[in-house]
Image: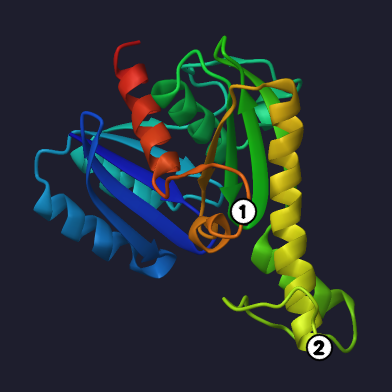
Amino acid sequence: MNLVVDIGNTLVKLAVFQDDKLLKKKVSLRPDFLKNLDELLQSFPHVDHAIVSAVAKISPRWLQKIDEKCIVCILTAELPQVFSNKYATPLTLGHDRIALVSAATKNYSKQNVLVIDAGTCITYDFKNDNDEYLGGAISPGLHMRYKAMHTITERLPLLEPEEEVSLTGNSTRNSMHAGIIFGLTAEIDQMIALYRADYKDLTVILTGGDAQFLCKRLKNSIFANSNFLLEGLNYILEFNKSQ
């Protein structure tokens, strides 16, 4: 039984897998991590392997606590991967992107796949039908766009996304919503269209914290999967158990 830990700057995601089946997921604030970890391990006493992925600093206490219970695998760019990495600077490839491409390789082997992660940034990651990762793109995410407009200007307010937005904003606030939301969805739709122009049989996966907000606004056919990154981390762990 596997424990998957994905450490972000604010939130930590914990998940328990039996083989490739997700049994439980918890989302924790960083200060509550040890409490939530204890609760999860008490509920699943047979967890014996773990993988830890981090974009932020890992507390030594956290690792020690996991290590007391599990054989721990730390995700790094040097760890053996399930796909062929053709990125020009493979050591700079983010752990989240490695996990997403791993999930794409497991679930859509020998297919052309574009994974779009709608998180703090929007990342686009493409693997071809030879299971080769070729790269992608990074752009500002939904909330980052709101924060940038407020921070870099003197008078624009800090807003939160709204469900009902008109294409033609009739106020400054509504114009900001229209520019950000319609602008971002147009970007995603166009990126998909550009990839599909080169790869007719393209599969598109949308994941990340803002996936549900965005997916209903997109024109293109996509598969939304909020657990795609966790599935990728679990697959990396299973793959490295046999190395």
**Image height check: is 84 above or below 171?**
above
| Marks 2 and 1, the one that precedes in the sequence | 2
- Mark 2 highlights which residue? 170
Using the rendered view, name the quadrant where residue 88 is placed. Answer: top right
| Disc 2 from disc 1: Cα separation | 23 Å
At label 2, the amino acid type is Asn
- Mark 1 highlights which residue? 218
Which quadrant does the N terminus fall into? top left
What residue lies at 57% left-to-right and 76% top-to-bottom? Answer: 163
Using the rendered view, name the quadrant where residue 210 is placed. Answer: bottom right
Which quadrant does the C terminus fall into? top left
Picture coordinates of residue 86, whole percent (x, y)? 68, 16
What residue lies at 49% left-to-right and 21% top-to-bottom? Answer: 79
Q: Nearer the viewer, residue 146 or 204?
A: 204
At label 1, the amino acid type is Leu
Q: Is residue 224 visible?
A: yes
Question: Taking 210 as reference, is 82 left or right?
Answer: left
Picture coordinates of residue 121, whole percent (x, y)? 67, 53
Q: Which mark is residue 26?
A: none
